[in-house]
Image (spheres, rainbow, N blue to C red):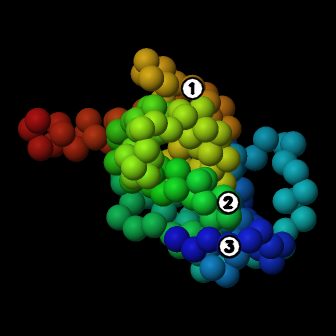
Amino acid sequence: MKTGRNDRNQSTTRYPSPLGVIRLSAAEEGLAGLWFETGEDPADLDLAEQDLPVLDETKRWLDIYFAGHEPDFFPALHLIGTDFQLEVWELLRRIPYGETVSYGELAAQIAANRGIKRMSAQAVGGAVGRNPVSIVVPCHRVIGADGSLVGYGGGMERKAALLKLEQNSWTNVNEKAGL
């Protein structure tokens, strides 16, 4: 995962997912943005429409994902954020396919990594909410302390659908294995 400053030398393309059109943006270094189009998208629409290899790789990743399988690779990433946001986004990438964690669990992990007593779950939630590469960096796998679905920029219906897709994939694998 490469990190850097925000620059306008990015390319964009669209991906027609089962949950709606997804906009992808990338720099030469890697995927910089992935979000569901809402019809109210900001000035990012003025990015050049072209395919970079990382955009093609991300489309292939999404094809596998939406077919109900866990992709066995990650597209190159070019995430831009604060050190804290980057730390949270790296933890998001480590949440196993088909599993969920709470904001509090992520906060406890960051506290442990930093050798401090506690970290604010709200601060973690703020960083999760600024994740520029949803689905690939799976912020949809973060839930409330009580197990409820909370907060997702793509909408709660999509969050539920993404989690269901992953759960159904695990159910199918377990049934085939006789578990």
Amino acid, disc 3: Gly
- The reply to whether dot 2 and dot 3 touch (C-beta < 8 Å) is no
**Circle on res. 160:** none
- Residue at 52% of width from left, 71% of height from top? 1
In the rendered image, is residue 6 in sight? yes
Q: CA distance from mark 1 to mark 2?
A: 22 Å
Q: CA distance from mark 1 to mark 3?
A: 29 Å
- Horizontal and vertical percent position of residue 140: 52, 39
Residue 151 picture quarter: top right
Q: Horizontally, is 179 left or right of 100 in the view? A: left
- Location of residue 69 in the rendering, given as x and y in whole percent from the top left corner: 36, 52
Helix, strand or loop at disc 2? loop
**Of label 2 and label 3, which has the lower sequence position?**
3
Residue 162, image x and y in percent?
49, 38
User: Residue at 49% of width from left, 34% of height from top?
Assistant: 103
Where 72 sits versus 39, above or below? below
**Which amino acid, by three-letter code, is at mark 1?**
Val
Name the residue tied to disc 2. 81
**Eye-nearest disc, 1 or 3:** 3
Q: Quadrant of residue 177?
A: top left
Q: Residue furthest left?
A: 178
* Residue on which disc 3 sits: 4
User: Which residue does the numbered mark 1 point to in the structure image?
Assistant: 150
User: As shown in the figure, which amino acid type bears the numbered disc 2?
Assistant: Gly
SS category of the residue bearing label 3: loop
Q: Earlier in the sequence, mark 1 or mark 2?
A: 2
Viewer-nearest of labels 1 and 2? 2
